[in-house]
Amino acid sequence: MAKQVFEGVQMDASLNAEQRHEFSKKLSTVVWKIKVDDSTAKKDDGPAHVAGVCISPMGYILTSSHVIKPIVKYSGSCSSWKAGWTSLKVVKRSLSCGLCLLKVEKTGSKKVDHTDLAEMGVLRVNQHLYGFGHPEFVEMSCPYTFARGSLEFQCDDIMELPPCVNDLDNPSAELLEGQDMAVYASEIKFDMKKVLASSPRMVKHLKCIIDVKLFRPKTILLMHQDIPLIQIKNFHLGYCGDPVFVSSGHVVGIILFKFHDINFAVHLSAIKEFLKDIDLANVQPHVS
């Protein structure tokens, strides 16, 4: 039977080494490793492995949109899922929000270990945040590596955000992703003082400070300008799609990319906006 793995668990400075290990072990049971299905894999289908987090006993997995392509088949696995690699289907993908929701296919009566979204997204400077990195290029004896970082800028809940349009079937999406983003970004004007003072920094400011000629993934520039991002320092194993946890073990963000040793993650406010039309307890959700 699936369980909500973080009920009653709290990470803080008072925990001893054994308790910290137990916390990280629980963390690993809801973090999924996602890969292109071997039978359909192509050379240009993206990175070998990305990460996601299960946020429902029905097997809904939240990850980053730019690592998931609409026409590619994916499979996933995690330490608590004993069936091995299993097929995943795309439920909703939004480039404007930077998020994608997948679902485990053919779970039958079996439910999946999960954690919930955090109730609030208020984060203070230097607050500890937690996550897992999935080794992508080398084989390691430990498939999940516990990471702890700290918040660089204050984050607040944002009540009103632009709607996250479901652009999964938008024929222009793939075309936009292939455009020369240097041309797209060349028209942007900005005030550096305002950029540095923004808390949290918004995507519209990141468009100004990123060198688009070298930056990957360029699809970040297609996100809506008002999507708030969490900035995490010393989060040494951030992979695209990694969940960001607070000390209660609940999800407060999804990693988008790393830039100048800072990991940027979609904030909880945008995650809630993205999921507002999804019934996570429903076996077959309807997405309008």
Image: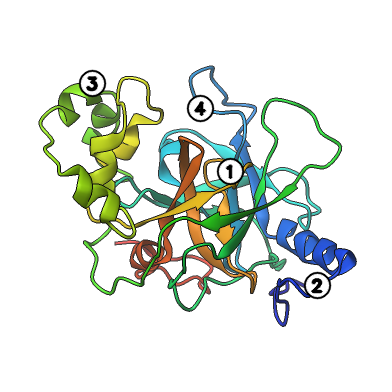
Location of the C terminus (image quadrant): bottom left
Choose between 91 and 220: the one closer to the eye.
Answer: 220
Residue type highlighted by circle 3: Asp
Q: Which residue is mark 2?
A: 15
**SS for dot 4:** loop
**SS for dot 1:** loop
> For this view, does 195 lie left or right of residue 286?
left
Q: CA distance from mark 3 to mark 4?
A: 18 Å
> For this view, does 164 lie left or right of residue 66?
left
Q: Is residue 234 above or below residue 80?
A: above
Q: Earlier in the sequence, mark 4 or mark 1?
A: 4
Say if mark 3 contacts mark 2, CB within 8 Å.
no
Residue type highlighted by circle 1: Gly
Q: Nearer the viewer, mark 4 or mark 1?
A: 1
Q: Nearer the viewer, mark 1 or mark 2?
A: 2
Q: Which residue is mark 3?
A: 180
Say if mark 2 contacts mark 4, CB within 8 Å.
no
Q: CA distance from mark 3 to mark 1?
A: 26 Å
> For this view, does 79 lie left or right of residue 224?
right
Q: Earlier in the sequence, mark 2 or mark 4?
A: 2
Q: Is residue 180 above or below residue 55?
A: above
Residue type highlighted by circle 4: Gly
Q: Which mark is residue 238?
A: 1
Q: Residue at x 79, y 29 (%)?
A: 139
Q: Position of residue 155 (x, y in %)?
A: 39, 65
Q: Residue at x 58, y 43 (%)?
A: 238
Q: CA distance from mark 2 to mark 4?
A: 39 Å
Choose between 215 and 177: the one closer to the eye.
Answer: 215
Residue type highlighted by circle 2: Leu
Q: Nearer the viewer, mark 3 or mark 4?
A: 3
